[in-house]
Amino acid sequence: MHRAATFLIGIATSLGVGQAQAGAWPRGEGNHFVSSAVYLHQGKDSDWTSLTYFHEYGLTPDLTIGADIGGAISDVGKAVLFLAYPLPPMFGLNIGGQIGIGTVDRQPVLRPGISFGRGSEKPSGWIVTDAVLEYFIDDQTYDWKVDTTFGLNVTEGLKLYGQIQSGQIYGDLPYARLEGSAAVRLRPGLDLDLGASSGLYNSDDLRLKIGIWRSFLRFHRAFDRA
């Protein structure tokens, strides 16, 4: 566990105002965001640990490229490169599309996705839904997931957010989880992300998360989703 935590801090601090994954909001030209986390899983039959690494870079004001490495929808290893782009807003919602390509469990996959959300000023916060499909090219099968996040900017240095996580692995029953997290500002540009989730249906009994958010911006941008 100590080695895993050291690894997380090392890769995060090497890059250089903490933000969550952009989703429906473009990252912004020249801006980077990195999140990395250790997950401790407690299942009915066994316990295990997994690592994740996520990196976004604003290629242009509208286009974001990135890498998503770690546990896939099926909890096996994945490595996906993706391009995210804005779509026309509807019903007051920001909307973003995504297309990715990579491997899941060493099998080639295409990963389309869509995100939609909005921010609020009073209270200061945001809500966003991210939907992703992992299409296995060789097998012509797919896994999917839909995560809805509710976030609240409590203070400048504390953000609370909850997630309803759902999805389905091909050939298995759908799953559902409920997760609560807190992002605590350690110093400008570095946040500690702590969370726990409980399985609601066909999922792990318990997951604990210890993560780091790290970003550096070409132009200053507040975290608020307004």
Image (tube, rainbow, N blue to C red):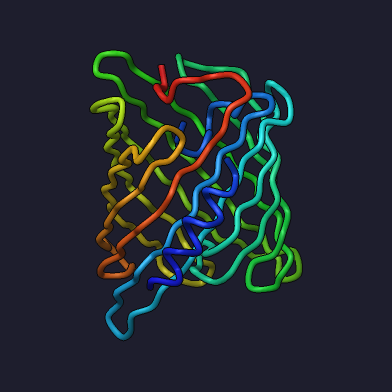
Q: Depth check: give the residue in front, 152 or 213.
A: 213
Which quadrant of the view contains residue 173?
bottom left
Residue 179 placement, left or right of 172: left
Could you tell me which residue is drawn at 71 percent across and 54 percent down? 110
Q: Position of residue 76 (x, y in %)?
A: 54, 71
Q: Position of residue 188 (x, y in %)?
A: 42, 32
Q: Quadrant of the N terminus?
A: bottom left
Give the residue furthest to the bottom. 45
Which quadrant of the view contains residue 135?
bottom right
Q: Compared with residue 16, is residue 123 higher up or lower down, i.e. above or below?
A: above
Q: Compared with residue 138, is residue 28 higher up or lower down, i.e. above or below?
A: above
Q: Compared with residue 185, is residue 207 higher up or lower down, i.e. above or below?
A: below
Q: Compared with residue 55, is residue 205 higher up or lower down, i.e. above or below?
A: below
Q: How many marks?
A: 0
Q: Quadrant of the C terminus?
A: top left
Q: Position of residue 17 (x, y in %)?
A: 46, 31
Which quadrant of the view contains residue 105?
bottom right
Could you tell me which residue is drawn at 29 percent across and 53 percent down? 195
Q: Depth check: give the residue in front, 114 or 37.
A: 37
Q: Position of residue 49 (x, y in %)?
A: 41, 73
Could you tell me which residue is drawn at 28 percent across and 58 percent down? 197
